[in-house]
Amino acid sequence: MDILFSSTKLAKILNSTKELRKCYGADCGERIGRRLDDLRAADNLAVVRKLPQMRCHELTGDRKGQLAVDAKHPQRIVFEPADEPVPKTLDGGLDWGNVRTIRILEVIDYHG
């Protein structure tokens, strides 16, 4: 999949092993890097959805339209489909198999 970023600052951090470790610590930074590698290697979001270690899921409430994958508990990588228009199924749900570009919004613990 193609990965875009919500800001150049976030792109700089998430595309650098050194910056990942500096911002998130060695363990979490390494895990975030592996998750990004998994996202890049996937053909589409349906592939990511099948990887149990990712726990890819749609968010609700004020985060409707966003998705997340696990990094290192409690951190999550939050993103949104960036295909234009966003692929939808006939019933209006997200067409996971046709999402080929995502935009990373943030890495956060949104539970706290």
Image (cartoon, grey):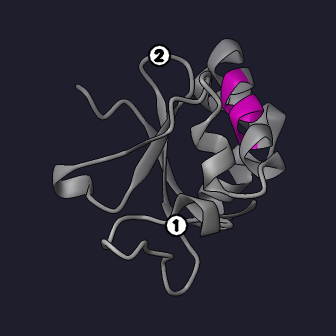
Q: Earlier in the sequence, mark 2 or mark 1?
A: 2
Type of secondary structure dominating the magenta stretch: helix
Q: Position of residue 63 (x, y in %)?
A: 26, 54
Q: Magenta segment, which residues?
A: 31-36
User: Among all residues in the image, which is located at the extreme front?
Assistant: 90
The amino acid marked with disc number 1 is: Pro
Q: Residue at x 62, y 54 (%)?
A: 45
Rate crowding at label 2 as few (under 14), some (14 to 19) or many (20 or more) other CA atoms within 10 Å.
few
Residue assigned mark 1: 81
Q: Position of residue 49 (x, y in %)?
A: 57, 41
Q: Residue at x 31, y 73 (%)?
A: 92
Q: Residue at x 64, y 42 (%)?
A: 48
Q: Position of residue 111 (x, y in %)?
A: 25, 28
Please determine whether, in this image, residue 53 is positioned above or below residue 41: above
How far apart are the alpha carbons under marks 2 and 1? 23 Å
Q: Secondary structure at mark 1?
A: strand
Please determine whether, in this image, residue 6 is positioned above or below residue 56: below
Give residue 73's mark: 2
**Which of pointers 2 and 1 indicates the residue nearer the eye?**
1
Q: Is residue 75 magenta?
A: no
Q: Position of residue 109 (x, y in %)?
A: 36, 30
Q: Which quadrant, please, contains the N terminus? A: bottom right
Please determine whether, in this image, residue 4 is positioned above or below residue 76: below
Q: Secondary structure at mark 2?
A: loop
